[in-house]
Amino acid sequence: MLRTPARPARDGPAGVEMKRRTADELLEALDAPGFTPALRDVDGLVELLASGGRDRAEALERALRRVGPPAVPRLLSSFPESTPPLRGRLCRLLGRIAPAEPAVRALLLAALEDPDDATRRAAAGALGRLREPEVEAALLRAWNSAGSDAFRRALAEALGKAGDAAALAALREAHPEDPEVARRVARAVLMLERTAARGETSTIRAEVAPERPQPVRFTCRAGLEPLVVEELGPGWRPRVVGPGQIEAELHGPLASAWTSRIATEFALALPPVPRRRDEPLAAAIVRLLASPPALEALRRWTAGPIRYRISFAGGGHRRAVVWEVARRAAAERPELRNDPTAAPWELRVAERTDRLCGALHPRGLADPRFAWRVADVPASSHPTIAAALARVGGARDDDVVWDPFAGAGAELLERARLGPSRRLIGTDTDERALAAARRNAAAAGVRLELARAEATAFAPPEPPTLVLTNPPMGRRTGSHRTVGALLERFVQRVAERLAPGGRLVWIAPRPERTDGCARAAGLRLETSRALDMGGFRAVLQRWLKP
């Protein structure tokens, strides 16, 4: 099997050039996953690039890009004597590796006047990565000269990325006959207008309340819905509408929606719009975005221009649809500006057979709930799960709380927010986790008693009234084969250590193994709910020691 270096290597000791690989050897290496050529392979790969078909050329360009800037001098030296299609491929390749390097920029600018149309198009595409006055001027000269429709398509796209006021003025005045050129010009104008408007800031008015109750949708991990309902309370009129979905009513400031510490996010729910027969998806999305409830919310809670981006509940970018939405929305509602980079609002769209559903997510609204989280460790609890555990555990003034698998301290710190306690004790076998817990406790202003110890061997200084923990699941740490036995021993030890009337509140990753141990040790199960842990199921349990 051919061995390939993990990264570009020197040609040889003390600069001595090693023997070049043959074309067959390079082609064999090219098929190996992650092949990264040595510098001595560049000339041979360029020779293959000159004659390879389109699919092979893409693989060769990917391999040459992995060499990076050290390959640039050899690629530049290959260009003067090259012929199509190599000339265009070299332009594209140099534009990917180092477009801002002076020699590369000069070559690309000159290539805008190359006799070969494919080379001109590749040069234009590469120059679209450079936002410089010299580049804009050169692209505009090429735009104003006679050229093929294919070249003008590439120029329009490049001007949309690299242009400024002059490009915007020129493209606004353009009326191309070719439909594809016209489409790219319209898209470039949108991009340039979006860039020009970024000097005006857009923020979310967190302190503003709605004139009337605003429907709001909270998202949480499936299984925690009743806890979010309980946490919000009757004033929000919450109701579960699906797995991990709770609908409620916002009456106070928008920022008050962060009342729920168990929800992962919230959004302003919009009434669905019916799907019309044969209506393009982009047109339906614009009707949703420009609907009176959406416009009222955007206007009420936005300071500055209304900027939005679009995402889809099923995933995927669907760029063609997004660009068509941006074009239609700009024509119908100029106040709506599509901007995936600087948008404080995200319209998340969910398609149904007969309707289109959507919600406005306030991406620009800071989440203040877990300001204590200044340090983390791999596989530590997500704060929303820690908040759920703390809520199920409850708070008593005389609580002695112990987290045997403390990690970065999330469970203990979320318990501290619920009210006073006598002691907060955390143990972990990883000193890095304990260091993170100390930093988080300092940020929260909470005193934790932390010790490096194994959960089944540690004896708390006094019997705990609450054991609160999210134990190792074994899936991220790779110890899934041994974690079951560890947790059985742990449950038995907790039952021994707990004070009478004490609670064990934890997430059980192997309830089929640990439930029997807990009952045999005298614990009584009070609550149990299945929980989506992001790819696997576990059970959030509360046990009582009578």
Image: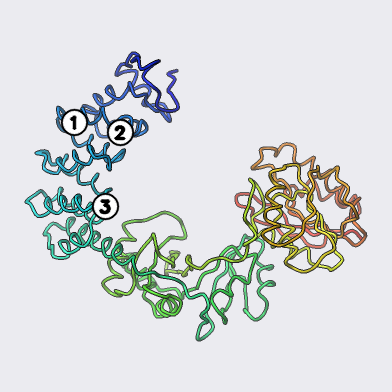
- Residue 97: which disc? none
Mark 2 or mark 3, which has the lower sequence index?
2
Closer to us: 219 or 161? 161
- In the picture of the structure, the residue carrying the numbered disc 2 is 61
Residue drawn at the location 18% of the way across and 55% of the way down:
180
Is residue 197 found left or right of 203 in the rendered image?
Answer: left
Quadrant of the rendering where the N terminus is positioned: top left
Q: Is residue 164 above or below residue 284?
A: above
Residue 128 place in picture, x, y as percent: 25, 49
For this rendering, which residue is in front, 546 or 92? 92
Between the C-alphas of marks 1 and 2, the distance is 15 Å
* Cα gap from disc 3 to disc 1, whole angstroms: 24 Å
Q: Amino acid at mark 2?
A: Glu
Q: Rate crowding at label 3 as few (under 14), some (14 to 19) or many (20 or more) other CA atoms within 10 Å.
A: some
Specify the amino acid type for callout 1. Phe
Label 1 crowd bin: few (<14), some (14–19), many (20+), radius 10 Å: some
Q: Secondary structure at mark 3?
A: loop
Residue at 17 percent across and 56 percent down: it is: 181
Dot 1 or dot 2, earlier in sequence: 2
Percent across and percent down for residue 411 are 72, 57
- Quadrant assignment, res 415: bottom right
Query: Which mark is in front, 2 or 3?
Result: 3
Instruction: Tell me if residue 367 can be seen.
Output: yes
- Looking at the image, is 245 positioned above or below residue 379? below
The image position of residue 229, as x and y in percent, is 66, 72
Taking 194 as reference, is 489 above or below it? Answer: above
Quadrant placement of the C terminus: bottom right
How far across and how far down the image is residue 99, in percent? 27, 42
Query: On the picture, is 179 further left or further right than 351?
Result: left
Choose the circle earlier in sequence order: 3 or 1.
1
Number of the label disc, if any, that sits on residue 79: 1
| Disc 3: which residue | 131
